[in-house]
Image: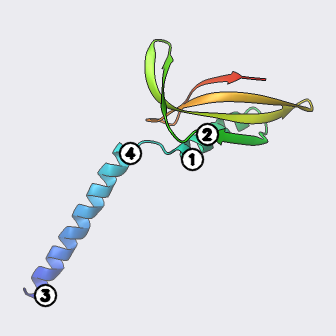
Amino acid sequence: MSVKKAIIAAGLGVAVGYFAKQQIDQMQKVTPEKALKQAKETFKKQGPISGSWIYMQPQEVEKNGLLYDAYRGGVTRNLDGENKQYEFYVDVETGAVIDAVQTT
């Protein structure tokens, strides 16, 4: 194989690899860590939070007659010297908070 053919083959391999990675990234779902980060950013718009958690396994959630695969998580906020806990669900596909309720 000549040097010219080897360079062309290597360039083609890099290009195919790059485009394949782009396609995989677009199809990939939101990770639990990223979902928690996005949820925390959403809650921080209303004030500081002091703690957070998320379950790593998604579960099926029904909201307004629609089914979602979602991560379940929670945050703790200190409001007026009192800890308030909230649970939320984050859509696995988009990372959007689809439901949040105060638990205590």
Mark in the foreground, 1 or 3: 1
Instruction: Tell me: 100 left or right of 35.
Output: right
What residue is drawn where x is 43% and y is 20%?
A: 67
Are the residues tagged 1 and 4 within 8 Å (C-beta)? no
Are the residues tagged 2 and 4 within 8 Å (C-beta)? no
Q: Is label 3 in a helix, a strand or a loop?
A: helix
Give the tally of numbered discs.
4
The vertical placement of 48 against 82, above or below, is below
Q: CA distance from mark 2 to mark 3?
A: 53 Å
Are the residues tagged 1 and 2 within 8 Å (C-beta)? yes
Which residue position holds label 4?
A: 28
Which residue position holds label 2?
A: 54
The vertical placement of 27 against 20, above or below, is above
Residue type at numbered disc 4: Gln
Residue type at numbered disc 2: Ile
Residue type at numbered disc 1: Glu
The vertical placement of 46 against 28, above or below, is above
Q: Please tell me how crowded label 3 is: few (under 14), some (14-19), or many (20+) other residues with Cα within 10 Å.
A: few
Q: Is label 1 in a helix, a strand or a loop?
A: helix
Which residue position holds label 1?
A: 33
Where residue 97 appears, as percent x and y from the top left, is: 57, 30
What residue is drawn where x is 72% and y is 38%?
A: 44
Q: Is label 4 in a helix, a strand or a loop?
A: loop
Instruction: Tell me: 81 left or right of 60.
Output: right
Q: Is label 2 in a helix, a strand or a loop?
A: strand
Q: CA distance from mark 1 to mark 4?
A: 14 Å
Q: How is the image coloured?
A: rainbow
Q: CA distance from mark 2 to mark 4?
A: 19 Å
Q: Tell me which label, 1 or 2, sits earlier in the chain.
A: 1
